[in-house]
Amino acid sequence: MPFIYNPPSDPFLEVIYQDDDILVLNKQAGLLTVPGKDPKHADCLETRAQKEFPTALTVHRLDMDTSGLIVMGLNKFAHRHLSLQFQNRNVDKIYEALAIGTPQETEGLIDLPLICDWPNRPKQMVDHDRGKPSQTKWQTINQDDDYFRVQLTPITGRSHQLRVHLMELGHPILGDRFYANERALKMKNRLCLHSKEVTIMHPVLKEKMTFTSKVPF
């Protein structure tokens, strides 16, 4: 079936935190972070934010199908400061996911280099010769009959990193239309991946701030 973009509209915008310099939002699954090239893909978190906060500037992104925390800058200084934090890996991010199966271990480090799978973009793939270094820490939270809840801490921030790494571990994320096997895809009607915690250095206050978002699955 061809993809039809139908972003959720309720709530239109969920603000977690806002001051003179930063804006923290909770993005819903199915909503783009920034506009797509197609005019039909203009509705996104960035354009919604700018209707209420005209100076809001995007610092980082989440996949359309991933939900959770997004940090924006509300002026050029804050935007640059935050962008450098993400670029230099000075931001702590924690995700939660539901993945199929029962892992043999309860925690570990996935260290597999990733590269774009160009014939099938935007999909990514492991490539030990040309891929960029990519590391993800994982830890099981609890086990259900045929899937488990897992906490994911990305060390690097490659596109689709968490999704590909769990697939390569043999445990694709439930509801993942790109990487899940048929059984895992049918188990949930959304990608069960959520950015639940982000810790940044406030650009002006120079204090570490941690924001959290309730996992919706």
Image (tube, rainbow, N blue to C red):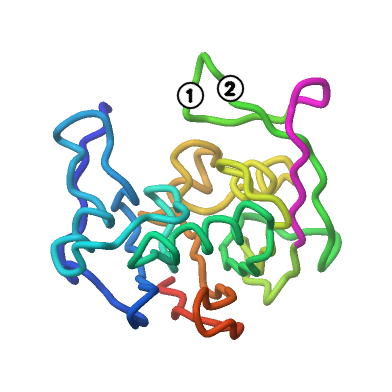
Q: Quadrant of residue 45?
A: bottom left
Q: Residue at x 59, y 56 (%)?
A: 84
* Residue situated in front as seen by the camera: 210 or 162: 210
Residue 214 percent location from the top left of the image: 44, 80
Residue type highlighted by circle 2: Asp
Name which quarter of the figure residue 208 lies in: bottom right
Q: Is residue 91 above or below residue 57?
A: below
For the record, the magenta segment spans 127-137
Please report the residue visible at 35 percent of the width from the left and 80 percent of the height from the top.
16
**As drawn, which residue projects farthest toward the top?**
119
Q: Is residue 112 above or below residue 73?
A: above
Q: Amino acid at mark 1?
A: Arg
Q: Residue at x 53, y 78 (%)?
A: 202
Callouts 1 and 2 close, C-beta under 8 Å:
yes
**What is the number of the mark on residue 121?**
1
As helix, strand or loop, the secondary structure at mark 2 comes to: loop
Mark identifier at residue 117: 2
Residue 58 % position (x, y): 38, 55
As measured in the structure, the alpha-carbon distance from the residue carrying label 1 to the one carrying label 2 is 6 Å
